[in-house]
Image (cartoon, grey):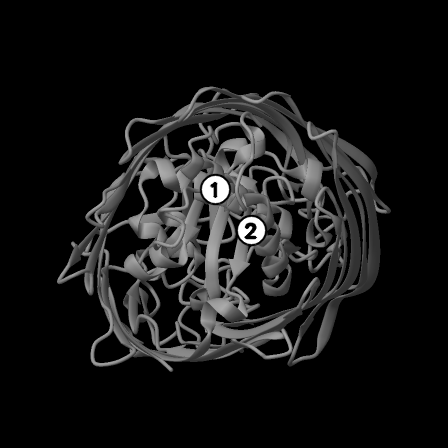
Amino acid sequence: MNGTQTGTCPASAERVGTWGRVEGIRPRLLRSVALGACLLVAGFPTTGWAQGTTPSNQSQEPLKKLSIEDLAKVEVVYGASKHEQRLAEAPSSVTIVTREDIKQYGYRTLVDLLKGVRGFYVASDGAYPFAGLRGINRPGDFGGRVLVTVDGHRLNDPLYDSTFLGTEFALDVELIERVEVIRGPGSSLFGNNAFFAVINVVTRRATDVAGGEVSGATASYNAYSGRFTYGQRLANGVGVVFSGSAMAGEGRTRVQYPEFSAINNGVAENLEGLNNETIFSSVTRGGIAIQGALVNRHTGVSSAPYRTVFNDPRFKYVDERGYLTFDFTRELNADMSWRVGLSYDHYRFEGSYPYNYSAPEPGTVTINRDRARSESVGGEFQFNQMLRKRHRLTIGSELRTDLRLDFSNADDNPAFTYLNADRSATMVAAFAQDEYAVRPNLLVNAGVRYDHFDTFGGTTNPRAGVIYTPAPGTTAKLLYGQAFRAPNAYESRYQGDTVAGYKTNPDLRPEHVYSTELVYEQELSRDLRLASSFFFSDIRGLIGIRMDQADGSINFDNLTRAESRGFETELQAQWANGYRGRLGYTNARTVDEGTGLVLSNSPRHMVKGDLAVPFWQERLVAGLEVQGMSSRKTVEENGIGGFWLANLTIVARNIGRHLDVSASVYNLFDRKYGDPLSSDYRQEVLPQPGRTFRVKVTHTF
């Protein structure tokens, strides 16, 4: 660092670091912020890898008041390197979605949030949403090429790789402090499922809540929800957060499906009812953090997948997802720390499917029940050290044991069992990453992880990046990474007899991606920032369903090699008067390398834009989102037209005392659009909801 330190800055920074330990924030980061603020006031330069700081005259203002230049210095990301670092230093293209964004744009679930992030799109089959990125979102998959974590803890289940982005997600979005959307392969640190991106959800701490909150909402389709949250830091330094929420709704009461015109004129009636309850709690003190969550969701389905009986109210899905984590972090000194994490995870699924086995002739309807359950325990160790102020070394290991991977499938009446499998699995891994500051404006990041599964063996996945800052406000990143998605238990172990029609494939292997990306980020002024990326991904061994022509059975196999290439750009604005917005565009071409054909559900063009406008001394804020997508293909190679959507939210703050009210309209202009379905459905395209609304009231105390 240039210049001579004077005054009381170092001592002040040390006191801030001590406070950070009490508050559960990493002391080294806070010391650097406090020391950098003092140096900036004294007139010393603060750019460069070791001095990611925020100006002292801005640090106490809300983030919405900061300029783009100051935001770049304040915003940090954890999930890119498993430690806090400035966005400009992260070996990824990263988008941060804050709690303020969630409020101003009326996000109800992670689905709404991801639809507003450049490069991402979400397709729904009516019961579950699945996230895609840069032109890849395969119909019939369960979303396992994106890893979702909560405070660094894996949420994808080992049965289906499900990402749980909708109402089945373990948390109410009001408990989210920020969401880190980290593009690119992340298997060098996170292992399985960190294929195209890692989405790390950071929860609110006790000091973020600082009291009680009661919230209630009403929405379209006779939907109602309520939430109670309490958070407080006690006198003994213990931070406590507890929250419970519930929602219920009828869903669409009438949905028209021309494919079933022979039954009830193709109208499904009163089938989309939804109920869910979530509980979340966390306790922290110093370096100890205990966290747990549980969600239980029951939902109906109107589209009659898997050749079930149409318009039968007995078709239901049940999802139950819970986890408990224990983390202990210790700072040995300003340059050395270690962390130990233990976890328990639970997932339960039940599907109730009405079948007429004598079809096409009328007959007795039999209820088939498909059940699955997993129980997993895991542990992780991580060590961080700064070496000679130029290297930041991160090493670690992970162990996860799936104690139960149970599948069963049976008919009720007459009783008949097709499948009853009870399995287990174990994974061990080791990883290392080194961040080396070659010069104050040149950072090299390199890492590798080895994972070994008892089902198929081992896989090694490296990552490397060169991050160059030629001038203040300008950053260029050249990134390369490899990642994998292991066959999940459903793909590799769901095996029934000849009636159930599934066979295991002992030769099934993981999917792999080899990705190169060039990222350019430029602060155009104190109010404007530009971020652009050029990307290329070679995806090998995509898993799909293969039918055995001899007996009609199906199994999963590595069928396809695909290629995705393109670019994306986004302009972000943050004005001093409180106005802020983004405008982004993604161009992605994704093809099957064997046939040269564009993949199904792969849009070439996507446009995202949003604008937040404050009124009445910022006590009233209007948030407008616009999203556009070009045409896509179905699995039958037919086209689906593109569409534009707009969402509008108005938030009124501090009405009376401690009362916030928001009103949102989604699909403002009632556009008609749909998402492609897999071959499990008779329909090629599932129509999505038209115009809907939500009104929410929140009281804090």
Q: Secondary structure at mark 1?
A: helix
Residue that mark 1 sits on: 38
The quadrant in which the C terminus is found is bottom left
Q: Residue at x 73, y 55 (%)?
A: 494
Q: Secondary structure at mark 2?
A: helix
Compared with residue 473, is residue 69 higher up or lower down, i.e. above or below?
below
Residue 65 position in % (x across, y down): 29, 50
Residue that mark 2 sits on: 12
Q: Amino acid at mark 1?
A: Cys
Asked if marks 2 and 1 touch (Cβ < 8 Å), the reply is: yes
Residue 43 position in % (x across, y down): 42, 31
Label 2 CA crowd tier, 10 Å (few <14, some 14–19, many 20+): some
Q: Amino acid at mark 2?
A: Ser
> Of residues 481 and 388, which is closer to you in this image?
388
Residue 361 position in % (x across, y down): 48, 68
State the residue lying farthest toward the front.
Answer: 7
Q: What is the number of the mark on residue 169?
A: none
